[in-house]
Image: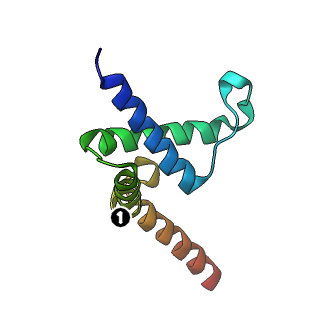
Amino acid sequence: MSSAPAASTWHTAVVVDVVGGAQGTISGSADRGGYERLDVWAASEAFNSVLKVEYVHRYTFHTRTEARIRITTWITDFYNTRRLHSVCRFKSPIDYENEYWASLTMGLAV
């Protein structure tokens, strides 16, 4: 019997634990009739996919605590500040948000 499914399940549990703890829980599922927030569900699934492909599956975590710390650090130090996002016109979320708020301030100043 292979240990791959167990490892995959553990990685998924850590990702859900870390992300769920940081962002709160996502209620509702299309399988259970929770169609009212599919946009949130889709965004969460996309983020989880990126997190797993770009970080979680590339490293080995010896403990859940190590995984929580390293994943949280990756999110705050790379994903939000340096990783370019297509939805943000290929800027980091921080740069995109700063530019957005600056444009609002400039509009008010005129």
Drawn side of residue 73 relative to residue 47, left or right: left
Q: Where is residue 1 in the image (x, y as percent from the top left)?
A: 29, 14
Q: Which residue is drawn at 59% across and 74% down?
A: 104
Drawn side of residue 19 relative to residue 67, left or right: right
Q: Which residue is drawn at 34% across and 31% down?
A: 7
Q: Residue furthest bottom?
A: 109
Q: Which of 41 and 56 is in front in this view?
A: 56
Q: Which amino acid does label 1 sit on?
A: Asp
The C terminus sits in image quarter = bottom right
Count how many numbered circles sit on residues in the image.
1
Q: Which residue is drawn at 38% across and 59% down?
A: 69
Q: Where is residue 94 in the image (x, y as percent from the top left)?
A: 44, 66
Q: Where is residue 72 in the image (x, y as percent from the top left)?
A: 41, 58
Asked whether residue 30 is in view, the answer is yes
Residue 20 higher or lower than 41, as above or below: below
Q: In which quarter of the image is residue 70?
A: bottom left
Q: Residue at x 39, y 55 (%)?
A: 65
Residue 70 higher or lower than 55, as above or below: below
At mark 1, the secondary structure is: helix
Q: Nearer the viewer, residue 2 or 86?
A: 2
Snapshot colouring:
rainbow
Q: Nearer the viewer, residue 64 or 54?
A: 64
Q: Which of 50 and 99 is in front in this view?
A: 50
Which residue was labeled with disc 1? 77
